[in-house]
Image (spheres, helix red, strand yellow):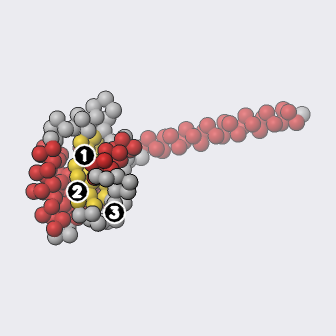
Amino acid sequence: MKNKLFQSVFTLSIAILFSFQSCGQQKTSNKQKVWVYDYENVLTAEQEQQLNLLIQKFEQETTNEIAIVTVENIGRFDKMVEYAVDFGNQHGIGKKDKDNGLIILFSKNMRGTFLATGYGTEKILKDEICSAIIESSMVPYFKNQEYYEGIKAGLEECIKKWQ
């Protein structure tokens, strides 16, 4: 009797577990992916939402993926490029088969910004183009402490060049 009761409880537990898992999977599939990681807290929630929507729309139209990352420091890394590449790899930015990711890395504290491209992306957004975007579209805003405006201007310029 105990054995049958145990089996019934065990079977019921497994069934409940699977139904919770399938409910969770349905919810996450409808969830919007986050493209803005504001670890330095330089953006408002509304600004993050606006940037996420711009990137989401661009990703839906092109499959290209962009992440905006703000940080106070780059931790164990010596250069921003190393941090950005590691971040992109860890978070899977860009489609595997296309390597079409872009990381826009910004640090108010370090007074720096960097655009890291996947191999598929760098065919269009070459280093000299990325440098020009930073210098002409982003830095003028950063000098006036208008961080959102600079990040958004850089994002929009990357999108424009990439289309």
| Relative depth, front residue between 66 and 12 | 66
Q: Position of residue 67 (x, y in %)?
A: 30, 49
Q: Sequence order check: which comes first, mark 3 or mark 2?
A: 3
Give the numbered dot on residue 108.
none
Q: Is residue 113 visible?
A: yes
Residue extending farthest to the front is: 78
The tag on residue 72 is 3
Q: Is residue 144 left or right of residue 65?
A: left
**Which residue is pictured at 19% across the width and 38% down the height?**
122
* Mark 1, secondary structure of its residue: strand
Report the residue that reaches farthest toward the right.
Answer: 1
Type of residue at label 2? Thr
Q: Position of residue 60 (x, y in %)?
A: 27, 40
Report the residue at 79% width, 33% height from top.
7
Q: Which mark is residue 113?
A: 2
Q: Is residue 44 above or below residue 86?
A: below
Q: Amino acid at mark 3?
A: Glu
Quick check: marks 1 and 3 in contact, CB under 8 Å?
no
**Residue 141 screen position, x and y as percent:** 15, 64
Calculate the distance from the C-alpha at mark 2 to the C-alpha at mark 1.
10 Å
Query: Can residue 54 be spotted in the picture?
Result: no
Front one among 85 and 148? 85
Residue located beneath label 1 in the image: 116
Q: Quadrant of the N terminus?
A: top right
Neighbourhood count class around disc 1 (C-alpha, 10 Å): few under 14, some 14–19, many 20 upward? many
In the image: residue 42, left or right of residue 22: left
Residue drawn at (64%, 40%) of the image: 17
